[in-house]
Image (spheres, rainbow, N blue to C red):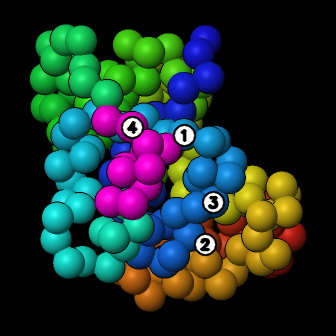
């Protein structure tokens, strides 16, 4: 297993929109994304967080990696969106140690292929345990305010695991 960490667009966008993208750099040093995820990040737009994403890509700690073969991701696209499919394919091709993905169906498919997954909530809990964050709740609230979908049950579970519930 490599030390490579792959990410889907959703967690990157959420962390960037709330000003917390640097948590990923602190935890993992670098993140790899497939080209489709790069397209989904829309770094050339003026949406909140795009400047931070663009800076991370330009600094080289978010790396765009091309897939060797798109056949597997083409099949996965029948079940999930293209960015998630390519993220799973990249994690498989590179034998990544971790895939950062929030989509429930994408997580299930990745796990069924032996890929270790973590979501935004898990990232926040790890950041708190590592001393990067003092509290998880302000970030969860900021994510929610930025339009990031978190079910009440998931919000509660994250708070409990972060010892804030």
Left or right: 148 as drawn, with respect to 137: left
Q: What's the magenta region? A: 54-64
Q: In the image, what residue occupies the spot 56% across and 70% down?
A: 20
Residue 5 lies in the magenta-colored region: no
Left or right: 25 as drawn, with respect to 46: right
Q: In the image, what residue occupies the spot 41% across and 75% down?
A: 17
> Which mark, residue 128?
none
Measure the alpha-carbon separation of dots 4 and 1.
7 Å
Q: In the image, what residue occupies the spot 63% across and 60% down?
A: 23
Mark 2 element type: helix
Which comes sooner in the sequence, label 3 or label 2? 3
Q: Are the residues flagged by discs 4 and 1 in contact, CB closer than 8 Å?
A: yes
Query: Can residue 155 be seen at all in this image of the molecule?
Result: yes
Residue for badge 1: 30
Measure the alpha-carbon separation of dots 3 and 1.
11 Å
**Quadrant location of the C terminus in the rendered image:** bottom right
> Which mark, residue 63?
4
Left or right: 135 as drawn, with respect to 64: right
Q: Position of residue 161 (x, y in %)?
A: 79, 61
Mark 3 element type: helix
Mark 1 element type: loop
Left or right: 158 as drawn, with respect to 112: right
Q: Are the residues flagged by discs 4 and 3 in contact, CB closer than 8 Å?
A: no
* Quadrant of residue 22 within the rendered picture: bottom right
> Which mark, residue 155?
2
Which comes sooner in the sequence, label 1 or label 2? 1
Q: In the image, what residue occupies the spot 43% across and 23% down?
A: 91
**Quadrant location of the N terminus in the rendered image:** top right
Residue 55 lies in the magenta-colored region: yes
Mark 4 element type: strand
> Which mark, residue 23?
3
Q: Position of residue 104 (x, y in %)?
A: 42, 47
């Amino acid at each position: 297993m490599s030390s490579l960490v792959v990410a889907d667009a959703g967690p990157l966008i959420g962390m960037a929109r709330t000003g917390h993208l640097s948590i990923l750099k602190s935890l993992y040093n670098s993140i790899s994304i497939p080209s489709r995820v790069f397209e989904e990040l829309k770094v050339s737009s003026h949406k909140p967080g795009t400047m931070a994403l663009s800076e991370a890509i330009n600094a080289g700690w978010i790396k765009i990696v091309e897939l060797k073969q798109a056949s597997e991701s083409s099949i996965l696209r029948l079940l999930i969106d293209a960015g998630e499919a390519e993220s799973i394919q990249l994690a498989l091709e590179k034998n990544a140690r971790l895939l950062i993905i929030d989509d429930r169906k994408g997580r299930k498919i990745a796990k069924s292929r032996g890929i270790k997954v973590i979501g935004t909530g898990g990232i926040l809990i790890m950041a708190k345990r590592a001393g990067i964050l003092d509290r998880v709740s302000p970030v969860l609230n900021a994510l929610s305010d930025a339009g990031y979908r978190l079910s009440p049950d998931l919000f509660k579970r994250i708070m409990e695991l972060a010892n804030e519930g």
